């Protein structure tokens, strides 16, 4: 049974992309870390387009190898073919964007893990489970990896897979250019040509730039090169021609390059060509595996390549299927796609990782409330928050769908200890009780402090707005939220906005929807909303509609507690659980309030505090789960 659409085989690496644009690699001051390597990029791009993809490669038994494996999982790529090599390091690549024509890069691949791929790593049953196999040319450059590739090709042919080659010619990876020539795309080599031509008969589809067909065909005349490849392969040839687009050639090579089948191109600004070919290949796979005609498949491929050349990084630039369809339907509004706010919102919101369809959150990010309790000291409160984390982890017990809210000012120890536990982690930035909103000093006046945050932390901001506020108050609040939202996106962080208008005045069914509407009108798109436990279904219906009208891809809503008794929370949960957009709750003092007051005064032990908080948190989780189950049953 074919459980996979495509398996790719070959390189995997960690890409360190220079963050400064228009600079030499020598002058880079910081780097962004992404997963990389042509087949790995293709597998990720295909997964984003809804294909079930996998990659066969090797990674080191170290931090970067674990990053590659974990990132593949986040991207939805099957990792059964990823072998951990205990003796070698994961490959590393340093890249930069100098200008529209210069993209310096250095490959750190001396005896790297993926070049140790061997025949023993190729599992026939795994290959047979896929509809297609994609090979990239680099792994034909070494006898050991070539043997692994040939074995995979033989299995693929035996089990009726479609087989494709991305020529992916990197002269220095074939040993015909130096370490400092990573940017070089073409050096003539009879040896490389002969090696490629010895395998071209395996393939149904061969993809390359004009320069890559030059090396495969053994001549710098593109038509002659295509004809030379045709002489040893019956594959459909896809030639990428830069600004001229791409052409497909079936059967006899025509007299003119322009006589091939083409798809529409997309006139966009070239910002970064690195990884564009891999994005192109992912889009091409979508069309090829759907049996689309070549103009349609090339349309998908060209569009995915356009996204890649307009953004920073390789895999992070590739579109989701929703984003691709949106782009093809709406068209280009501006050539620098990365600055198209509407398109970037779709890109961001449809490419987020992790499944948080359920979120039961223990909120102990409180600062002012603890500071006002008898016996408080910062040190004691920090130790208490570590106990809160212990309680949360006891209830979580390694299961998905649990989270915490914890601050960095008092709860730093707990916040750092939560890393890698599988908990969703929200972190507050507002100065407690401020109105108009002010932020914690640690963020700095330009919010530069967010650069230090782990990328899986969610920026949580509590704001006290009300529709009846005067314009001066609204302007002040929205200005801060706008700057904060921009900073979260700039740093790749999700944003949770909490609003509590009931603290300021009377509220009705339209109060929260009016606030939500105003936030969106300001161009602010929270990933999460944290809302009060409403008393009526009408309020929930209108609030949800206000959100979904502006952002159909929102992560969701969590319900706050407001220190309500458990029985009252149970009633509010029952009402909120009827709304699918509500993913869970974020409750604090109902869980920790009694324990904190007793523990800070020395009237409760650590063990008793953890026991009490874990019991209360677990009970709320049970109440929420029961409420959601009943809501689904009643809706069926």
Image: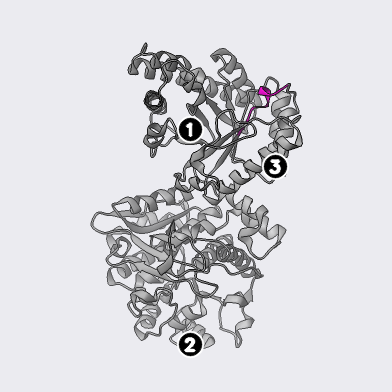
| Mark 3 residue element | helix
| Mark 2 residue element | loop
Whole-angstrom CA distance, mark 1 to mark 3, is 27 Å
- In the image as oriented, which residue stretches furthest toward the top? 603
Q: From the viewer's perspective, is residue 233 above or below residue 578?
A: below
The earlier-in-sequence mark between 2 and 1 is: 2
- What residue does disc 1 label? 401
The earlier-in-sequence mark between 1 and 3 is: 1
| Mark 1 residue element | loop
Callout 2 environment at 10 Å: few (<14), some (14 to 19), or many (20+)?
some
Q: Nearer the viewer, residue 427 or 214?
A: 427
Q: Position of residue 456 (x, y in %)?
A: 47, 43
- What residue does disc 3 label? 520
- What residue does disc 2 label? 220
Q: From the viewer's perspective, is residue 340 above or below residue 195?
A: above
Whole-angstrom CA distance, mark 2 to mark 1, is 56 Å
């Amino acid at each position: 049974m074919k459980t996979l659409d495509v398996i790719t085989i070959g390189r995997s690496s960690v890409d360190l992309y220079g963050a400064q644009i228009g600079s030499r690699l020598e002058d880079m001051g910081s780097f962004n870390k992404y997963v990389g390597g042509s087949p790995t990029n293709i597998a990720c791009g295909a997964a984003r387009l809804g294909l079930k993809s996998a990659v066969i490669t090797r990674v080191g038994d170290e931090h970067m190898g674990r990053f590659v494996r974990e990132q593949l999982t986040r991207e939805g790529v099957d990792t059964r073919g990823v072998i951990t090599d205990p003796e070698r390091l994961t490959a590393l690549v340093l890249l930069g964007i100098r200008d529209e024509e210069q993209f310096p890069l250095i490959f750190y691949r001396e005896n790297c893990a993926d070049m140790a791929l061997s025949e023993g790593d190729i599992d026939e049953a795994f290959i047979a489970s896929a509809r297609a196999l994609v090979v990239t040319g680099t792994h034909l450059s070494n006898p050991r990896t070539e043997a692994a590739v040939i074995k995979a090709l033989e299995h693929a042919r035996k089990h009726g897979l479609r087989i494709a080659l991305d020529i992916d010619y990197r002269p220095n990876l074939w040993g015909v250019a130096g370490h400092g020539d990573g940017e070089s795309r073409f050096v003539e080599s009879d040896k490389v040509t002969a090696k490629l031509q010895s395998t071209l008969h395996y393939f149904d589809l061969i993809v390359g730039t004009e320069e890559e067909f030059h090396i495969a065909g053994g001549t710098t005349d593109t038509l002659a090169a295509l004809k030379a490849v045709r002489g040893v392969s019956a594959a459909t040839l896809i030639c990428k021609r830069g600004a001229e687009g791409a052409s497909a050639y079936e059967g006899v090579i025509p007299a003119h390059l322009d006589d091939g089948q083409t798809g529409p191109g997309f006139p966009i600004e070239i910002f970064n060509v690195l990884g564009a070919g891999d994005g192109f290949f992912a889009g091409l796979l979508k069309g090829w595996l759907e049996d689309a005609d070549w103009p349609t498949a090339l349309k998908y491929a060209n569009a995915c390549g356009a996204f890649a050349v307009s953004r920073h990084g390789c895999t992070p630039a590739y579109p989701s299927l929703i984003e691709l369809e949106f782009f093809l339907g709406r068209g280009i509004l501006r050539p620098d796609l990365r600055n198209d706010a509407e398109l970037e919102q779709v890109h961001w919101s449809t490419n987020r990782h992790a499944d948080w369809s359920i979120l039961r959150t223990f909120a102990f990010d409180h600062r002012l409330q603890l500071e006002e309790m008898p016996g408080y000291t910062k040190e004691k409160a920090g130790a208490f928050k570590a106990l809160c984390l212990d309680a949360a982890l006891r209830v979580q017990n390694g299961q998905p769908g649990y989270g915490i809210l914890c601050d960095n000012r008092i709860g730093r120890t707990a916040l750092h200890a939560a890393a890698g536990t599988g908990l969703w982690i929200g972190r507050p930035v507002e100065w407690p009780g401020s109105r108009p909103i002010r932020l914690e000093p640690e963020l700095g006046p330009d919010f530069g402090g967010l650069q230090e945050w782990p990328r899986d932390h969610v920026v949580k901001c509590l704001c006290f707005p009300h529709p009846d506020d005067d314009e001066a108050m609204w302007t002040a609040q929205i200005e801060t939220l706008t700057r904060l939202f921009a900073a979260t996106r700039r740093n790749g962080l999700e944003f949770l906005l909490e609003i509590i208008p009931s603290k300021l005045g009377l509220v009705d069914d339209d109060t929260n929807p009016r606030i939500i509407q105003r936030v969106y009108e300001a161009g602010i798109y929270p990933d999460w909303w944290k809302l009060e436990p409403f008393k009526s279904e009408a309020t929930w219906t209108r609030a949800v509609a206000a959100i979904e009208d502006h952002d159909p891809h929102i992560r969701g809503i969590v319900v706050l507690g407001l220190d309500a008794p458990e029985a009252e929370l149970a009633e509010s949960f029952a009402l909120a659980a009827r709304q699918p957009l509500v993913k869970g709750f974020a409750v604090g003092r109902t869980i920790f309030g009694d324990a904190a007051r007793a523990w800070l005064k020395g009237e409760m032990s650590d063990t008793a505090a953890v026991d009490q908080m874990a019991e209360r948190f677990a009970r709320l989780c049970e109440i929420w789960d029961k409420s959601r189950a009943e809501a689904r049953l009643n809706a069926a």
